[in-house]
Image: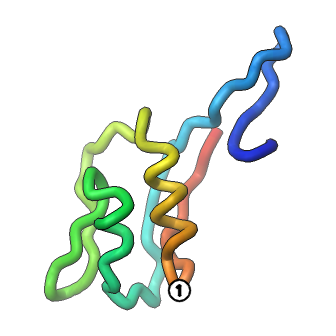
Amino acid sequence: MVFGCLINLYGAWEKMAVTRVWIEEGCISCGLSQVNCPEIFKVKAEGVTMIEGVDYSGLEEKIKDAANACPVQVIMYDET
């Protein structure tokens, strides 16, 4: 993996798809997740919630931006 991409059999770059997103314990509800990816994350008084049933295709960069911006590094994702 290089920068979230793979080289396919034909030598072309392919983006890796995000298959799962979750928030681990320790979220401080700073709001950066919602700023970076409002399609998935919503900040509420009781903490950050995730919108269910979201298709992650096309949101990979926003998801990664949210995870990288998280000051306590609790936004996680899997990709294939």
* Residue at 83% across, 9% down: 10
Residue 24 drawn at (x, y percent): 48, 77
Residue 78 drawn at (x, y percent): 59, 52
Q: Is residue 23 left or right of residue 76?
A: left
Q: Nearer the viewer, residue 51 or 37?
A: 37
* Residue at 53% across, 86% down: 72
Q: Is 53 placed above or below 31 here?
A: above
Question: From this viewpoint, which residue is outermost toward the top?
Answer: 10
Residue 50 drawn at (x, y percent): 28, 63
Q: Is residue 57 left or right of residue 54?
A: right
The quadrant holding residue 22 is bottom left
Tag 1: residue type? Val
* Quadrant housing the C terminus: top right
Residue with the mark numbered 1: 72
Q: Nearer the viewer, residue 75 or 34?
A: 34
Q: How is the image coloured?
A: rainbow
Q: Number of labelled discs? A: 1
Q: Is residue 43 left or right of residue 15?
A: left
Q: Is 53 placed above or below 9 here?
A: below
Q: Is 1 placed above or below 62 here?
A: above
* Quadrant housing the N terminus: top right
Q: Is 66 placed above or below 12 here?
A: below
Residue 26 drawn at (x, y percent): 45, 89
* Residue at 69% across, 43% down: 4
Query: Element type at marker 1?
Result: loop
Structural crowding at the residue carrying mark 1, measured as other residues with C-alpha within 10 Å and reported as few (<14), some (14–19) or many (≥20): some
* Residue at 46% across, 64% down: 66
